[in-house]
Amino acid sequence: MRWFTQTLRVFLRKSRCAPPIALVLLTALLNFCPTAFGACDDPSMTPAAGPGLYLRVLPSKPLKLTKLKPGDVVEGTLSRSVYAADHKLFSSGARIELRVDHLERRRRVPNDHWPWVVKAFTPRHENVPAFKIATVSDSTGESSLQVSLISISRMRDVHAKTKNKETAQVSEGERGAVEAAASTGKKNPVPTMILEAFDSGDSARTGEQPNRTAEPDSNPPDIVPSGTRCKILLLNSVSASKSKPGDVVYARLIEPVLVDSKVALPAGSVFEGKVIKKTPPRWLSRSGTLYLGFTEVRLPEGAHFPITASLAGAQLDERSHTRMDAEGGLHGERPGKAWMAINIGVTAGLAKEVDDGVQLVIEAIVSTATDASTAGTARIAATCVSVLYMATRKGRDVVLPRFTEVDISLDRPASLHAASEFDSSSSSSAAK
């Protein structure tokens, strides 16, 4: 929108009654095109051909991103085990060392924290440290990984509400290797770093071989039972304001799913789903809603079969105002005091500008107009604009950025032998 900014600047400089008119034009443009100055989502991306490793790092001390410079070393621990297929490469708690290679400018991740008026004046890019090499040390030895920073933020857990207000206790054999921790509501003083590793680093590993999560020669289970939890990572961003029903959503399994101590779904499997239903943020400060469902899983070797799964939890930024209902639907919370105070402040400023602008226009056109008549007309116009502006304010959005960690639960048992039937049915339908 650089062209609009330049045009508006010229209009402000050359027009006599530019301030109120320009403000009205800007408000109208933002109402009809809310994404003009907001943070835009990245375009949907299909999953890469090769599996990736995702590291979740908890720094050993608080980080100040603005203070980091090339050559600085960041130390921390893995807050989650790292898997490749059915192998556990690194255990949770392993030490990791990162060295800042350079600083790079990135687009800000979309969020639901503030209304558009704040986002309009917030820089759309930020400087973040770039890492290339990570050294992981644990009881099995030391490994070097080629990594790329995905995000740095303080996280909180959001889970689907249960009707009996009790946390369902599911055994590890039923839900696989995923353990969904209950949300404590406490703020984490140290931000969590999410990195993507491009090389497993097995060639650089010294000491024992990585542990397996199951017997190497064991036969896979036939059925994945209903209620099995899978921890996945979204590969494209979705939101209530920009996504449409039917849009495809991809995600990658980051921890293997076990059934009776056997690997049912190896890490790196790709889940395919879609946006089932969504309601964008609406007038009168009504928030948006978003429902996702997953219908297919593709194993690393290429076999794929149908499933039925819904959201059971997600890890969001601690400033996010999104909650989850019992069916796994995501809902934006009501605007808070700060949100409403900002909108009221903008309304007051807009009303003042319209009041002054209308009086100037009437006095310039009608030479016999009195101060009382112009003031009354201006106040009526300012009141109408204020009411219209407040009525058209939209509520909070529901935003799931790319690489958001999500827990899904199978709504019904999934047969692993349905892959061949699913492949044949897909090919026959494609032929028709």
Image: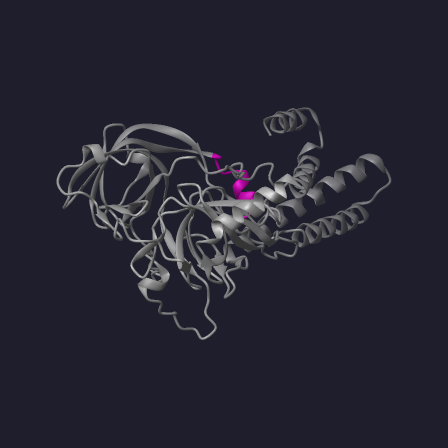
Using the rendered image of the protein, determine whether residue 294 is visible from the camera's viewpoint. yes
Q: Position of residue 425 (x, y in %)?
A: 58, 47
Tally the numbered discs: 0
Q: Nearer the viewer, residue 333 or 86?
A: 86
Q: Nearer the viewer, residue 189 or 94?
A: 94
Residue located 70% across and 54% down the image: 387
Residue located 41% across and 59% down the image: 224
State the quadrant of the C terminus.
top right
The part of the image, by quadrant, that contains residue 299 is: top left
Using the rendered image of the protein, determine whether residue 182 is visible from the camera's viewpoint. no
Q: Which range of residues does the magenta coloring cover?
A: 114-124
Q: Is residue 431 left or right of residue 331?
A: right
Q: Position of residue 23 (x, y in %)?
A: 66, 38
Above or below, comparing residue 330 to residue 6 in the picture: below
Q: Nearer the viewer, residue 2 or 351?
A: 2
Q: Position of residue 426 (x, y in %)?
A: 57, 45
Q: Is residue 44 left or right of residue 133?
A: right
Q: Is residue 97 left or right of residue 233?
A: left
For the rendered model, the colour scheme is: one colour
Question: Is 176 covered by the magenta stretch?
Answer: no
Residue, far bottom: 164
Q: Position of residue 102 (x, y in %)?
A: 31, 27
State the quadrant of the N terminus.
top right
